[in-house]
Amino acid sequence: MLEHAWVIPAITFTSFWLILFFGRRLPKGGSEIGILAVGSTLVLSCVMVAQWVGRAKTLAVGHGEEIEHIRGPVDNTVRWFTSGQFRVRVGTHVDGLTVVMLFTVALISFLVHVFSTNYMEGDRRFTHYFASLSLFTTGMYVLVTASTTLAALFGWELMGLCSFMLIGHWWEEKPNSNAALKAFFTTRTGDIGLLVGISILFWAAGGTFDIAKINQAALSGQISHTVLVVAACALLAAVIGKSAQFPLHTWLPDAMAGPTPVSALIHAATMVVAGVYLLARVYGVFWVGFHIPDGGFNFVAAVGATTIVIAAVLAFVQRDIKKVLAYSTISQLGYMVMALGVGAWTAAIFHLFTHAMFKALLFLGSGSVSHSVHSFDMVDDMGGLRKPMPKTFATFMVGSLALAGLFPLAGFWSKDEILLGAGENGYKVFMIVGLVGAFMTAMYMTRCVYLTFFGEYRGHGHPHESPLPILGPLYVLTVFSVGAGLLNAPFTHEWFGKLIENETFFHAGVATHDFSVPDALISTVVVLAAIGIGYLLFFQGKLPRGVTARQPLARVGYTFLANRYYLDHIYTGGVVGGISGPIARAAYWFNQNVLDGIVNGVAIVAKKFADWQYKYIDQGAIDGTVNGSGHGAEGLGGFFRTIQTGRVQQYGALLFGATALLALALVLTV
Amino acid sequence: MLINQFLLLGAALFCIGVYGVLARKNGVLVLMSIELILNAVNINLLAFGAMHQGPAAITGQVFALFIITVAAAEVGVGLAIVLLIYRNRTSVDLSEVDLMKG
């Protein structure tokens, strides 16, 4: 199966066409094809993981004595086309990173498909929705199995297209189609960087698109450092666009206009990590280009760190539950990018894996809630939902704690590994930023959980627990949110890390670090403090005393109850209103006015230029030429049609007359 | 032998033929005038052929034979067209046939 990885995207691609053509005629509107296709790819990807684990270690890396044997990649390529002296090949490149990504995407996609059968029931474009999901999944599969940058670009753009279609799924409402356009154009801005980067690397690596060769060329010093810096900057622009990093993150919150399962699949778990995946895949370029092993400071880590803080602050002021999760996603993507920036390669991929699980869980959980209360507004339409929706509440709780990074849930292990890597590799500043981010994450999730599930119900109507197709995926993801972290824990001997570490990883000589108890304790204390403070801020004075005592979260902050009014005062007038509120609002203002202003300014200039071009070049010069030639032809035709009388004798007269003239000319000239 | 006499005869026949093609209304007569033009050319070809000796002498006669063959075919098609025009319009007046007017 490892050689035949192309089967996986082929299955979902076939499913896309089948749904498109036959979906409407099937009893379940095409969803059964999608579920069957993605389900079979899930099975195949499990098989691939198993085969990868069982694969003999063949590739030898290292110098002299310290040769280390690792699992070599499995390549299967065919010639695609020949252009001049360049033979472009296409095919699959399977290594640990690939199989893990395939499994993650297949699992989340499968659960989202199941979830959607109920969530999207009765939608007018139900069939197209499932077709788009299939095509999207194909795009992601193509990206992660691609052996060349060119094939990766195909998958990348395919996802961009599907993202556009799915965000604008309900395009009849103007904001939705605007959001779809915004997402498309913003990511396209970054994609220019991808094209430039691919082109530069193609020439620099000696006329090849092959990712493994590019990495090798970059790491062996075959490509000059200046070229690598330019290429790395260009690729980083693509990462910033796709993975919603500062300052191109503004599209992701707007992308919540799409259906909730789509947000879970595309804007949390898979597509947005495409940027992170690209970064990890062509890591050699960044590794050398940005001097990652040297420590101190570098551009990639700075982008990630900025994103962590900016997005986490914004998550505090949102009323919409999906927007909280959207900003949280941006913030967590910042963690991954920062991890790659500080050289914690394994940690970044591990966080990608765990984050996919618990963020999909949270998004699907918010979908379950909104399915019940028909709204996303936490402040006006939610509250107290733990009673009518106990199962959703329990799973959401697990997801939130996993996101907050509480021992021993998934987020704890991966986040801790990132912080450890930052600390050990000489990036102390970024470790502190990461801790601040962890603190804020725990706090805004406390707020989100409180507003949604605690207090009094503020909406109208009668919330009810969701049916099994919605709860089933939540249960599965809950299991992963609890257990995924253990895969890379000290007592499993970093099984996950050993699984994914690939050729590039070893050639570059990326450092690995053992689990450190003091660091873990620090981050745990930070998280607990954040939850405690969050509890005091958001829960106090909002709940009857008895309920407070019964809740597990309440017990954490119970000792602080004596200070209740004092903290209540701080909560209303002080901390949230006085500090985080204005900062968050300022950041939001900056976001909306300055960044959007710049983007809009560019757009206005472009529009002015386009108008000018339209008026003078298009309408004046080009249309003038086209119309002029048209008028000329018409006039000429008008003249010639007068000759065409249809009378054969007149034609004859012209014929003889012309011949006589020619004969005369001949006689006179000779 | 004076070649001028043959050429003058050919020119006279040609002019009569051209006049007939351009001036007569009757389609059959127009076809006959075309025959006159072709035969004027034939006379010219034969006259030029007779001027030369050797293999060139025969060339003019061969060309004349070709023209007679083509003329026969042309008259066959032409008369068929005239016949169809007559069936459709009960007239062979060419000035009335102007369906191809632009």
Image (cartoon, rainbow, N blue to C red):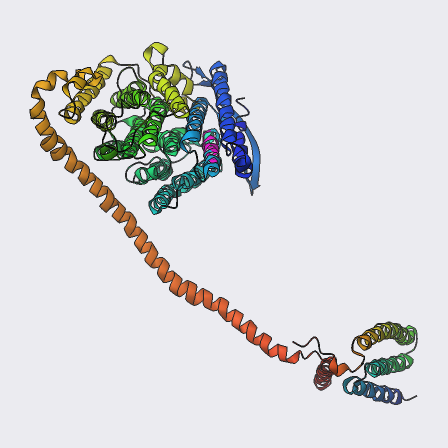
**Main SS class of the magenta portion in the image:** helix
Residue A141, magenta (yes or no): yes
Q: Residue at x 20, y 15 (%)?
A: A550
Residue situated in front as seen by the camera: A298 or A21 = A21
**Residue A545, image x, y percentages:** 14, 19
Query: Where's residue B62, x and y in %?
Result: 90, 73
Image height of B19 relative to A384, above or below: below
The residue stretch that appears in magenta: A134-144
- Residue sitting farthest toward the top: A491
Q: Residue at x 30, y 33 (%)?
A: A322
x, y percentage for residue A301? 28, 31
Residue that appears at 70% across and 78% down: A646
Whether residue A187 is visible: yes
Q: Which residue is drawn at 28% across and 23% down?
A: A400
Residue B88 placement: quadrant: bottom right
How many labels, in total?
A: 0
* Quarter in which the N terminus of chain A is drawn: top right
Q: Is residue A583 above or below residue A493?
A: below
- Confirm whether the magenta stretch covers residue A615: no
In terms of depth relative to the viewer, which is nearer, A351 or A519?
A: A351
A605 or A406, nearer to the observer: A406
Which quadrant would residue A311 be assigned to in this image?
top left
State which quarter of the image contains the C terminus of chain A. Answer: bottom right
* Percent coordinates x, y for residue B23 in the rendering: 77, 87
